[in-house]
Amino acid sequence: MHLPDIERIILDIVSSRTPRGWMVIDRNCRVVYANQSVLELWAKKPEDILYKSLPDVLHNGRKKDIAGNYLCPAVETLETGTEFRESEVALPGRAGRSSVWCLANTYLHLDDDGRPGFVTANYVPIEKFKSMEKELSSINLHIIKAFAKAIGARDTNTKRHVENVSALMVGLAEHLHCSAEQTALAYLVGVIHDIGKIGIPEHILNKPGRLTKEEFDIMRRHPLIGAEILQEIDGFATISEVVKHHHERYDGSGYPSGLAGEDIPFLSRMLALCDSYDAMTSNRCYRSPLSVENTLEEIRRCSGTQFDPVVCCSFLSFVSIHKNLSRKYQGAHGHGAGRPAE
Ligand SMILES: [Fe+2]
């Protein structure tokens, strides 16, 4: 077998039979090669992507987010020379509606004059949240999932909200360099923070439209109901406290206890942000979702009053870096910053 044959075989395997997505962009960010796995990752046909600008295909023409961070590792490598090695990145999913966590590698190829000519990139999806659940094997995740399922069975909006908030909590915890144990806990409280909604009457929980003051008063019992349920489980005292205080505000004007500042458990302060972010970027029957830009502005405005300013600063930088990830959260439901809390 001649060497060119071997190269052709390798190229054939890379292009059509590996789960790892391979792509090459030229110096103008145009996609000049994409294998089958890349096409499947973004549900594109070759004509949707080939010889088109990658930022146009994936990010509406943008290379960077509002904080100046690159949205795509391949483009970053082309423009800065920084290569990625098995780096965790969140890439847009199909039709830009969800994200896919991947390990990314990028390689810069210089032309004969030493200028950037091409970037080769490869991506392999990782089951990030499966590994997160392994961290939780010591506690009874099945019970928690059953609770979450029970809420989801009553209210599909809450189910989506819970999924979104737990994903945001993990991302923020990692951004804050929390330990693996703390990150797993962040995931867990994201999953169960609204468990007290089990105790809220159906007609209030699923009411199409704004709640009356009396209905809000009932809805506001859910952190306490959740805490009471969880404190019955051995080893859940801390988690119960976090859930109890996820609607406290940094300035002390929240509920149920009116705690302020660092008296509010740290994970509760994280939850308040992730919860509000998802609520504001989500559809409600009585209003459209806010844009990501307007949501970040609102969060910035509430820093130091509703939200812990330090956590807020980290959250803003986390969301800016993973702006493509944030699109995942369109279409869910929760509680809002600067809005009547539920
Ligand atoms: Fe809540």
Image: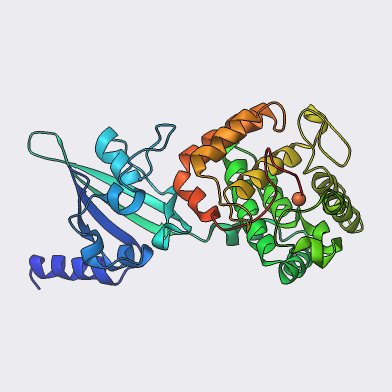
Horizontal side, residue 49 vs residue 310: left or right:
left
Residue 265 position (above or below residue 124): above
Whether residue 134 is visible, yes or no, is: no
Place of residue 34 in the rendered image (x, y in percent of width and height, measured from the top left)? 24, 61
Picture residue at 66% right of the left edge, 27% below the top: 309
Picture residue at 75% right of the left edge, 56% below the top: 192
Comparing 305 with 107, the one in front is 305
Place of residue 135 in the rendered image (x, y in percent of width and height, measured from the top left)? 67, 56
Whether residue 289 is visible, yes or no, is: yes
Horizontal side, residue 187 vs residue 324: left or right:
right
Query: Where, by quadrant of the figure, is residue 42 drawn?
Result: bottom left
Picture residue at 64% right of the left edge, 39% below the top: 178
Specify the quadrant that holds the N terminus: bottom left
Place of residue 140 in the rendered image (x, y in percent of width and height, measured from the top left)? 78, 63
Residue 113 position (above or below residue 210): above
Place of residue 212 in the rendered image (x, y in percent of width and height, measured from the top left)? 81, 52
Comparing 227 with 159, the one in front is 159
Q: How many marks?
A: 0
